[in-house]
Image (tube, rainbow, N blue to C red):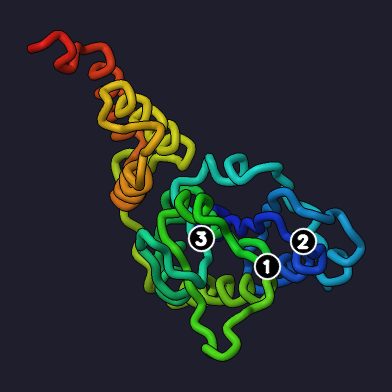
Amino acid sequence: MSLQNIRIVLVEPSHPGNIGGAARALKTMGLSRLVVVNPKRYPDPQAEWRAAGAQDVLANVQVRDCLESAIDDCHWVVGTSSRQRRIPWPSADATTIAQEVLRQAGAGEVAVLFGRETSGLSNEELQRCHMHLQIPAFPDYPSLNLAMAVQVVCYEIYRHLNTGAVVNTQWDRPPATVGAVEALLKHLERLLVETQFLDPANPGQTMTRLRRLLTRVELDATEVQMLRGVLTQLQKAPLGRSGQ
């Protein structure tokens, strides 16, 4: 059941063969949900050829025009990245994250993002993720083909599924979706601008750090609603503007 809650998302792949190769990688490890965001060429015969027996996965590929529509209903998102960031994000290797992917999939929808063949995921896209996944490779030539990277991650997920080592934590409320947390962040940003805590002309890294904080604590749906309610009430209050 957990595997049905896991989607693999390819962001703007340029080569259709990698879409077919990814479909094959999913099927060999018991996964079936492949989402492709704004592909350069798809459908394409090369995708069919590279799928090699995984045409059923390929036939059910969901094509989206933006990342938001691919992940907004998920509650936990992982982004693959090989680069260090100015503001560090929670990160781990594929083996460690595979266990967490399965645990989170026990509670709801999970997405694993893979970026463009040449440049990977952008900083903005990686900031939409709860964790960053890194695949250790030989330092002299650390570049993996996109479909190969998908295969490595899918293998680790399948391997941990069969160990029985994953413990699903029961919670009293469903986890908040990416879309709900994003709406909360936008609401918070509006309030911070209204109260002049945040200068929209020079925001610095404030919202990036607040985004990291909110994704790290794994809010549930009720907690997001409560926080939105608090922000709404604060917007209605004088907030010191009356001179008190």
Secondary structure under tag 3 reads strand
Residue 171 position, x and y percent, is 30, 46
- Image quadrant assignment for residue 219: top left
Amino acid of disc 2: Ser
Earlier in the chain: of badge 1 and badge 2, it is: 2
Earlier in the chain: of badge 2 and badge 3, it is: 2
Image check: 29 left or right of 195? Answer: right
**Which numbered circle lies on residue 14?**
2
Residue ID for mark 1:
118
Q: Residues within 10 Å of mark 2 (few under 14, many from 20)?
A: some
- Whether pointer 1 and pointer 3 mark residues with C-beta atoms closer than 8 Å, the reply is no
Q: How many numbered badges does the structure rendering display?
A: 3
Residue 90 position, x and y percent, is 35, 63
Q: Which residue occupies 62% across, 61% down?
A: 115
- Image quadrant assignment for residue 34: bottom right
Q: Is residue 54 above or below residue 72?
A: below
Amino acid of disc 3: Gly
Residue 243 position, x and y percent, is 11, 11
- Image quadrant assignment for residue 84: bottom left
Which sits in the foreground, 124 or 16? 124
Residue 233 position, x and y percent, is 25, 16
Front tag of 2 and 3: 2
Q: Is residue 212 above or below residue 25?
A: above
Real-space Cα separation, disc 2 to disc 3, in angstroms: 18 Å
Which sits in the foreground, 1 or 197? 197
- Whether pointer 1 and pointer 2 mark residues with C-beta atoms closer than 8 Å, the reply is yes
Q: Is residue 197 visible?
A: yes
Q: Residues within 10 Å of mark 1 (few under 14, many from 20)?
A: few
The residue most toward the left is: 244
Earlier in the chain: of badge 1 and badge 3, it is: 3
